[in-house]
Amino acid sequence: MTPPFTRRTALGALAGAGAASALPSLGGRALAAPSGQIVVGTWGGDYQNLQQAHIADPLMKPMGVQVVFDTGNDTVRKTKLMAERRLPRGSLDLAALTASGSYEMWKNGALEEIDETKVPNLRNALPQLKTKYSAPHIYTGRVILYNPKLVRTPPTSYADLWAPENAGKVGVIDIQYQTTIESAALVNGGALNDYEPGKAKLLELKNAGVKIYPTNEAMAQALKTEEVAVCIMWRARGVQWRAAGIPVEIVYPKEGVVLYVSELAVPKNARNKEAAYAYLNALLDPRPQAAFARSFGYTPTVANATVDPDVAPQVEFTPELRSRFMLQDQEYLAKNDAQLQEWWNKVFKA
Amino acid sequence: MVWGSGFRERLGRFAFRTAAALGLGLVLLPLVLVAWLSFFSNEILSLPPEGYSLRWYGAALAQPQFIGGLWTSAAVALLATAVGLLVTLPASFVLTRRAFPGREAVVQLLMSPLVVPAIVIGSALYMAFVEFEVMTEMPLTGSVAGLALGHALLTIPWGLRLLTANLAGLNPAIEEAALSLGARPVVAVAKVTLPLIWPGVVAAALFSFVVSFGNLEVSLFLVAPGQTTLPIAILQYLQWKIDPTIAAVSVVQILVVAAGLLLTDRLVGLGRVV
């Protein structure tokens, strides 16, 4: 016999239904849906504009998260992160850093360990680019650029920068002292955890008449005016320069392709961590990843990003090249950067 | 004035005018070059130009950071100039009129922002603001007030030097006459001294504005999230692109500053100031 349907059972049923319908939203609240404002410390210019156009506006705004950019250089960001460690609430919710910058900040206790459950897209990130304290945003590899009109034999190795026929045609960049010493070390018995053999090798290059330019931009002009015919550079820059009409070809050195990774990390004292994690997840979404590849020439860090076919050859790495990827030894660099820079300034540039 | 017509006099005049023209040319050359480069059509700046185009002006306008940066820079520079003058005007009166123990130390202290590299001032101020926040829980970092205060510090040496030089050259008898005729000190300063040193005040304000407007290092640390100054916007643009858009932005910046100078000239007569 079914119980009689009374006012009390009807109310009970309604309450039950109410409770059941409330469950998902309660569950949602337990996960603290991202909302409010986040401050993203980042490089400005096009890097910021693309984040605005492909992450902040289409992906974060619909979630109810307002993104504010704190524009500046990573050196300034690192100083801020260090200075603010004692504050319970820091000024940044996310900080864009180079791989060595985020390692340094992690070692100094400024960064949060990433909770991967809150960044589901991290499962698509290339394993060698992942760290426990950051999400990889874009990356590229180090290559040799050369002008085929001025260099008869295409280089295949960093060692070819020392070939007699290239004497006087090689340029190096002041701010790239670390990678320059590293490349020289790789052809003189050194390794990614021992740059010392690079020093003697670079002095040979100096004697052969190397030209030193202050910045990447100055190098681009020197290549354009044919003052220089060979240099070491990041592939993404090479792609951008070729698009801007600089006559260079790109070569992957046989020593290996050392990677440059640009990352984003959450400071320990971020004010809005839920939204910061949501931003990291959006960063790794295939759509903005493809947009960055098209505009920047850097490579997506997630395996599921589909790059337009016309861009793919310039930004993707073949499996063969991927097998030659090399990662800098951040611990070695953190310990040795100061002495490498001092040697560069006082001995090499003297 | 009677112009001499002898060979030596004419030669002297010719040499003087040539030197003046060369000097002026050297000063103007960078401005002319920047304006020229802004019309190059090639993306990588190199000579000779591959053609001419107005497209970089369009590209500059398409970057919201440049427009926003221009306004922030101007607002912060005006605020910093005002705060700087509030410090330097009274300070110059005291320093030129009174001898007291530690006077030299005060002068050196006020001049020190000129000696310390701006990047050190920027990072030190940032750390000091953070310490202030740790103690009081009142945030000073990332506010326009904090940025303007930092910039005001940079303007102080310029204002102090120009104002003390003007005050030192002032005949004290004029102010004394006003006082002896019964004017109260505040009235004497407002009605007699300030009008006499007015060119110095305008020059101090101009230098202060320019020092603040062009500053990069202090702004990098103190600018509020969501805001940017023009020098930061230019530096950040260069991080990723090296096309002549920056030259186009610089031309606009030069025009804005030139318009400001012309306006100042109409109002106070720059010839009396510089």
Image (tube, rainbow, N blue to C red):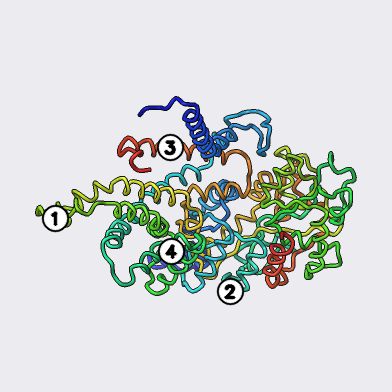
- B267 and B214: which one is in front? B267
**4 vs 1, front mark:** 1
Q: Do the CB atoms of the residues marked 2 and 4 lie less than 8 Å apart? A: no
Separation (CA) of disc 4 from disc 1: 35 Å
**1 vs 2, front mark:** 1
Separation (CA) of disc 3 from disc 1: 41 Å
Q: Do the CB atoms of the residues marked 1 and 2 lie less than 8 Å apart? A: no
Instruction: Judge from the rendering whether residue B170 lies leftward or rightward of residue A234; answer left or right.
Output: left
Q: Which residue is mark 2?
A: A109
**2 vs 4, front mark:** 4
At 25% from the left and 47% from the top, the residue drawn is: B196
- A218 and A319: which one is in front? A218
- Between discs 3 and 1, the one toward the N terminus: 1
Disc 3: which chain?
A: B
Disc 2: which chain?
A: A
Image location (x, y in percent) of residue A27: 52, 66
Callout 4: SS: helix
- Between discs 4 and 3, the one toward the N terminus: 4
Identify residue type, mark 4: Ser
Q: Are marks 2 and 4 on the same chain?
A: no
Callout 1: SS: helix
Q: Residue furthest top?
A: B5
Separation (CA) of disc 3 from disc 2: 49 Å
Separation (CA) of disc 2 from disc 4: 34 Å
Query: The C terminus of chain B lies in which quarter of the figure?
Result: top left
Query: The N terminus of chain B lies in which quarter of the figure?
Result: top left
Callout 2: SS: loop
Q: Which residue is mark 4?
A: B112
Image location (x, y in percent) of residue B266: 32, 35
Callout 3: SS: helix
Instruction: Judge from the rendering whether residue B175 lies leftward or rightward of residue B134; answer left or right.
Output: left
Q: Do the CB atoms of the residues marked 4 and 3 lie less than 8 Å apart? A: no
